[in-house]
Amino acid sequence: MYATQALTHLVPLAEELDKNKVTPGVLGFIVFAALAVGVWLLMKSMNRHMGRVDFEEAPETPEASGDAEGVGAGAGASGSAGSAKRM
């Protein structure tokens, strides 16, 4: 009941606005600026965390590369034939 009463008071105010002059205003600018600052801070944090990543790939051994070829062939006909040759 109270919500409908509030809406009836706001309807005349909405009719007074000129639809050609409505702009986002200061609140729109503040929201946009806050989003821009948030994205900037997230990107700065991401760059800092990516700089801390220390990834060193282990060198491949000849034995490991031979096993990887049979597994990497997948479920195709050549993959099943390759596993049958090893047995």
Image (cartoon, rainbow, N blue to C red):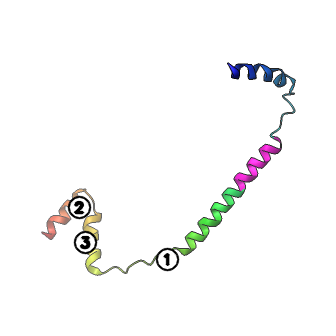
Which of the pair 57/4 is nearer the observer? 4
Residue 68 is drawn in which quadrant?
bottom left
- Residue type, numbered disc 3: Asp
Mark 3 or mark 2: name the one nearer the start of the chain.
3
Specify whether residue 30 is painted magenta. Answer: yes
What whole-number distance in Å separates the C-alpha atoms at marks 1 and 2? 35 Å
What residue range appears in magenta?
25-36
- Given residues 54 and 69, the one toward you in this image is 54
- In the displayed structure image, the side of residue 66 where residue 11 appears, left or right: right
Q: Nearer the viewer, mark 1 or mark 2?
A: 1
Q: Which residue is mark 3?
A: 67
Query: How far, Cα to Cα, is label 3 from label 1?
Result: 27 Å
Q: Which mark is residue 54?
A: 1
Q: Amino acid at mark 2?
A: Gly
> Tag 1 or tag 3, which sits nearer the N-term?
1
Location of mark 2 (residue): 79
Position of residue 73 relative to residue 11, above or below, is below
Residue 29 in the image: state x and y as whole percent. 79, 47
Q: Which quarter of the figure has residue 78?
A: bottom left
Q: Secondary structure at mark 1?
A: loop
Residue drawn at the location 18% of the way across and 62% of the way down = 81
Under tag 3, what secondary structure?
helix
